Amino acid sequence: MHSELHSRRSLHSLGLQADPRVSTEIPTGAAPPHGWVVPRSPTSLAPIAAVRLDDAASYETTITQATETFRRWREVPAPVRGQVVRAIGEEFRIHKEALGELVSLEVGKIRAEGLGEIQEAIDIADFAVGLSRQLYGMTMPSERGMHRLYEQWLPLGPVGVITAFNFPAAVWAWNAMLAAVCGDVLIWKPSLLAPLTAIACNAIAERVASRMGHPGVFRLVIGNDAEVGERLVADRRVPLISATGSCRMGRRVGQVVAQRLGRTLLELGGNNAVIVHEDADLDLALKSVVFAAVGTAGQRCTSTRRLILHESIADRFLERLVAAYRSIRIGDPLAEGTLVGPLISAAAVEGYDRAVKAASEQGGKVLTGGKRLSPGGLTGYFVEPTVIRAPKGNRLPIAHEETFAPILHAFTYRDLDEAIAMNNEVDQGLSSAIFSLNMRATERFLGPSGSDCGLAYVNLGTSGAEIGGAFGGEKDTGGGRESGSDSWKAYMRRQTCTISYGTELRLAQGIQFG
């Protein structure tokens, strides 16, 4: 099979077969032995390799060593740390194809998206290199004579990074490259659905850093929540936990970290909408909606899940949308021409089935899709990308829930204020978009009474963010910001410094003492 050939090639070229965590002697039986996990290709359900899990003892060793490494790494000048990250980015360029294929194998992304994810890791490394010379503080005028007042940003400590399966490399890179130039040590807990990608990426980063005289900056703990996850989020030695995943997971992480007065950077669910106004470029909107709704089989936190159409163009747009959906090639994500791969697991397929059934029971009409598939005889977790039209009155409660699958719910509106209210009425607030050639309409959407999401696009879909801008959302999405802009500040501690260079004691607020 095409995927299995790529599997062996990727494992070998990335050196995973020699990694002590990885075994290609895959245990037989329904469940792996205690202490191991066996990631399976969601395309064929075939096991890829076996991965040894961390336990409480190995976790403690990792944290102790990370704390010691931080004491050395924080003293390395930031531009020198940037050169380490620069070399890591170059190494990722060398292994881009093999890493991208590994992403496709483990999580089912089509090859173009797998390669794109590794390119995102490369891009954020480039961004971080420049940032290493721009960790600016501010100088403020002091109200006291012969005093200097300024602020500086200092390394924070070991940073825990918890990632989800859907971006098994890029989200780690957003955190790791920035945190590294900020002087922090990384402790990465990846999804158990994508441990091989994590092992490969972390090994590259750590190998490069070690070669340059800085071993131990990039660390990995692979384990279940009971053994590893709960310990990591509760650990006072880890001042920041950056967690990407479901809203339920984020609430748990936020609660535990808050109890110890630590910091969190949460990137949680999204229930993203696209508004197509009456004057929109429908050709552009159509292409953008299709990619945003079915890319990664609808398993992006930024996937378009709700389509809000002006009633004057709704029928003809939906007709074209259904035709486009029916032309989508579904199958092996590593085969040329495939646009949609599998879902990640049997549980994801069951969630898809429940959501389609619920929408029908609530009066929604399935315009296309709604079924499981076995394209080309593949036995993986394949489903049809689905469009469901809401009944009159736009009442469709299931659309307020985030289903991680390629299901798009279509609604209609008359007035733009109504459409913006529909965009904002869900609990999550990650990504949003409007298609319109009317400046007044787009500016209303972007204004204070417009979209309440952290990401807002005009004449673009809801997914495909660039690394230069801060990424994240509001409300149940968690409020965190990663990647570009000033997101680096999350990985540092601010210190306000006041220096007296006079001979007299001068107090603020004009206070006289003694």
Image (spheres, rainbow, N blue to C red):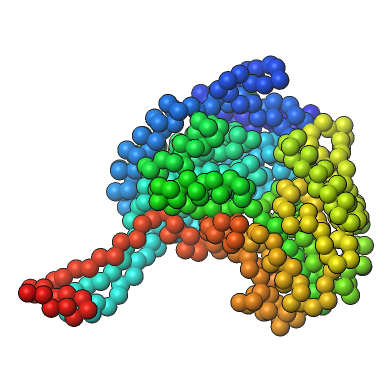
Give the vertical position of 320 relative to 111 (above or below). Answer: below
Residue occupying image coordinates x 92% and y 62% = 319
Image-based side of 111 in relation to 221, left or right? right
- Identify the image quadrant of residue 453: bottom right
Q: Quadrant location of the C terminus?
A: bottom left
| Front one among 121 and 389 | 389
Residue 108: horizontal and vertical position, in percent?
Answer: 72, 40
Where is residue 181 drawn, in percent x and y? 41, 52
Tell me if I can see residue 86 in this picture: no
- Identified at 17% across, 78% down, the residue is 511
The answer to which quarter of the image holds residue 395 is: bottom right
Return the x and y of residue 328 as percentages of the image width and height.
Answer: 86, 50
Instruction: Looking at the picture, tell me which residue is in the foreground, 96 or 20.
Output: 20
Q: Is residue 37 above or below residue 201?
A: above
Residue at (72%, 72%) from the top-left corner?
Answer: 420
Say which quadrant the N terminus sits in. top right
Asked if residue 138 shows in the view, the reply is yes
The number of callouts visible is 0
Residue nearer the viewer, 297 or 367: 367
Where does the image place residue 272, in percent across and percent down from the top left? 71, 60
The residue sitting at 34% across, 43% down in the picture is 70
**In the picture shown, does residue 320 fall above or below 255?**
below
**Residue at the outermost bottom position:** 440
